[in-house]
Amino acid sequence: MRDTLASLLRAHGFDVSLASSGAEALATCAREPAYEAVLVDAYMPGIGGLAVAHYLHEHHPGTRVVLCTAADERETRHALESGHVSSAVQKPFTEAQLLRALTP
């Protein structure tokens, strides 16, 4: 799914970096802190997407964080209310929903 999303986003003009885990995402963001938006899965291997969102909120507050999740609406709402997540897309989502979530 990660590669498919990357191809889709590149086709829409996004520069894309990939991470296979939350730890890899954190390391990538530490090396290249100028991301406008980061798409994270709520249940990434190891460090989850919400922890990545918290890190970005603290260390890169200008970065939009989009949570991709299959969790119930209550958990998604809680993530949005935390202020660490800019928007969320519920799986399964459409291309249009993803693009709306990633653009301010």
Image: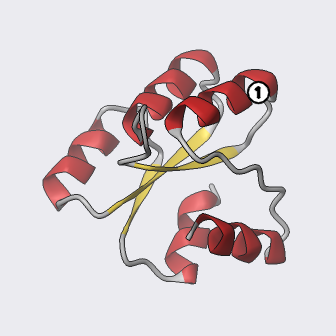
Q: Residue furthest top?
A: 59
The residue located at (23%, 58%) in the rendering is 71
Question: 10 Å neighbourhood of mark 1: few (<14), some, or many (≥20)?
Answer: some
Q: Position of residue 45 (x, y in %)?
A: 43, 43
Q: Position of residue 17 (x, y in %)?
A: 76, 49
- Image quarter of the C terminus: bottom right
Picture quadrant of residue 3: bottom right
The residue located at (49%, 82%) in the rendering is 94
The residue located at (62%, 36%) in the rendering is 25
Q: Position of residue 27 (x, y in %)?
A: 67, 26
Left or right of residue 75, residue 85 in this image: right
Image vertical order of residue 55 relative to residue 96, above or below: above
Left or right of residue 13, residue 23 in this image: left
Pick the front one: 49 or 64 = 49
Picture quadrant of residue 72: bottom left
The type of colouring in the image is secondary structure
Give, as a three-letter code, the residue at label 1.
Answer: Pro
- Image quarter of the N terminus: bottom right
SS for dot 1 = loop
Residue picked out by circle 1: 33
- Looking at the image, how many numbered discs can be counted on the residues? 1
Q: Position of residue 9 (x, y in %)?
A: 73, 69
Left or right of residue 21, residue 73 in this image: left
